[in-house]
Image (cartoon, rainbow, N blue to C red):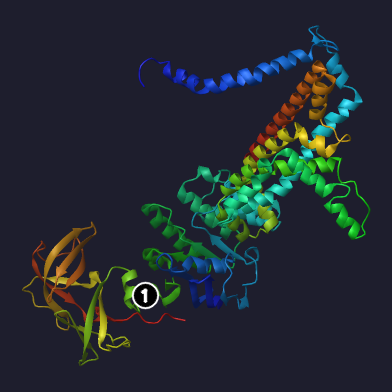
Amino acid sequence: MSGAPAPRTARAWLLVGPGLLVLAALLLGPLLQILTVSLFTYSPTRIWIPEPTLANYRRLADPYYLAVSWTTVKIGLLTTLACIVLGYPLAYFLARTRSRLVGLYLFLLVTPLMVSSVIRIFGWLVILGRRGLVNSWVQKLGLGDGLDLLYNTPAVVTGLTELLLPFMVLPLMAAIENVHPSIEEAARNLGAGALHVFRRVIVPLSLPGLVSGCLLVYTVSISALVTPALMGGRRVRMLGNLVYDEVLTSLNWPFASAMAVVLLAVTGGVMLFYLRTMRAVSRSRVVAE
Amino acid sequence: MIALELRGLTKRYGDHLAAGPISFAVEEGEFVSLLGPSGCGKTTTLRCIAGFETPTAGDILMDGRSIVDRPPNRRDIGLVFQNYALFPHLTVFENVAFGLRLRRWAAGAIGDRVRETLGLVELAGLESRLPSQLSGGQQQRVAVARSLALQPRLLLLDEPLSNLDFKLRVQMRGELRRLQRQLRKTTIYVTHDQGEALALSDRIVVLSRGRIVQIGTPAEIYEAPRSAFVADFIGSSNLLAAQLEGNAQNGATRVRAHGLVLASAHAPAAGAGPDRGAVVVLLRPERVRLLPPTASPPADTNAFPATITEITYLGENLELALEIPGGGRLLASLKAGAVDVDLGRGAAVLACVAPRDVRLLPAIEPEPLA
């Protein structure tokens, strides 16, 4: 395509355009509206009146909402951690196995994403409930009587980890596949035990996969709604649940918008901090060693 | 003193026999090559020694003690990988220091040893580079240095030159030989390149289909191959089916190949199979001399008329295809500058082969060595 000097940029816009348009119309627009509404005043009769105020944000400084924010971040971090701990061995196995069943394993890995959240969580209720599977065994073995396994932070983290594990495993697996097995063997040959090979070779070389896995799991988990609603009950509330209640029950949209903005800011802030740190770590590794 | 010994080493994958039984011993300071075509089991054998494969049967002894139950990180064996397997996230310095750090050496001692080893492979000054910033030859040197830095009891090299271009390969071959002469490190070298094996080795172990078919010095392997397979695999060769004509005088043997009767200075290999008189005659192309057709050949030499059917110019050498009495074909290789006959397609010449250059090999592949 020779001719005017413009075509390169024109073609670039043509390629980016449709996606950008969809994003602008369906994401940026509503986001801006949420931001605007969060600065409006709540009205019990008209939902909001366009009188600018910071009252919605001030209300968020209330200890209750601060605690919920902290719970949200904590659950996000714990879920990410759980996914790292469970995901690394799984990703390593999937990346290295020469089994013909690898396709089946991958299918099993993503099945939690294919099952409806409600059904998936009712499964957990059957397992962890007061008269559930675990408690019946605990009772049979005489280890206790009706443990509270549901409606607490570990329960929510368990439910989210089950759902989000594939988001950690898939990028990790792709990264580990790029590490030639002979590099591990070289480390073994130089005297490294399995743990050392993992720490000094596998982890640094699969860092890009770990970074994307963590970002995916963290962002999805802190905006969780159904899992904390059903497995956290009234006791473990995340920001998403509060937003939901404000929108549908209290009809306080300005306050709900303020919470959504804070949630977005927290997510964005953590992501930014995380990416910066990771980049600094990988740069210092190259320079220092 | 024997540094390493394999006793009946065997590796199977299910029904497939990858290698073995293989038995040989490596002397302290010796450079031994495992040579054979791809799929002959040489890399499997090497990986068993390094500990990355568990032998199905047999034993591996280092300084008289079995090491088969030791994990690969406890074997005191250095392995240089075919693809070098450098740590891409670590600098040259840290690659070489990797094993020393594991052994918790002091920082000063690590620095000294790394610099000393990098000097040995002539890479001083590149300590802070990453592997991706090095040429193939330099990466190869880092891989060697990384293994040598630990001063292992035994050094294993798995086709280390196969990823380099020709010029670099010859240069690195010289480097490896210099290192080996300098350090007298016991070394096992796996290759499918007979040139490398001949140039580097004290002894060569020739493998075929997982079994040892011959062990010997480079000269023994080249001059006195045990079988047609070895003769064919190492160097270029003329292999002619022939019949023994009974023993002649002076300890010489007479054989008939096609229309030729040749005297050989060697005793025939013990005949196996139904036809006990059948042998294979080996004539190395560079041992065939050509004279003008009217010349009188020296006494005690096999001489026969031949016609040149093809000439290939290879720079240093001329390769000629000859038609010999009885319709057979013979390759001859001559130094391009040292030819005193008229060469041209269709030219008649007198081909001469000394009896000591007529090797008699068994017509049926002999049993592999245990």
Q: Decide: is A189 above or below B305.
A: above
Quick one: B333 or B325, which is closer to the camera? B325
- Displayed quadrant of residue B255: bottom left
The residue at 72%/49% (across/down) is A86
Q: Is A174 left or right of B168, judged from the image as shown?
A: right
Image location of residue A118, percent across then percent down? 75, 39
Image location of residue B93, percent across then percent down? 60, 48
The residue at 66%/38% (across/down) is A211
Quick check: can you spot residue A80? no
The residue at 51%/67% (across/down) is B44
Quick one: A279 or B108, which is closer to the camera? A279
Q: Local crowd at mark 1 within 10 Å, few (<14), some, or many (≥20)?
A: many
Q: Is A42 left or right of B126, judged from the image as shown?
A: right
Instruction: Quadrant for the C terminus of chain A, please.
Output: top right
Q: Amino acid at mark 1?
A: Ile
Q: Decide: is A230 above or below B313.
A: above
Instruction: Quadrant for the N terminus of chain A, please.
Output: top left
Quick one: B31 or B80, which is closer to the camera? B80
Quick check: can you spot residue B327? yes
Image location of residue A202, percent across then percent down? 64, 49
The residue carrying mark 1 is B221
Disc 1 chain ID: B
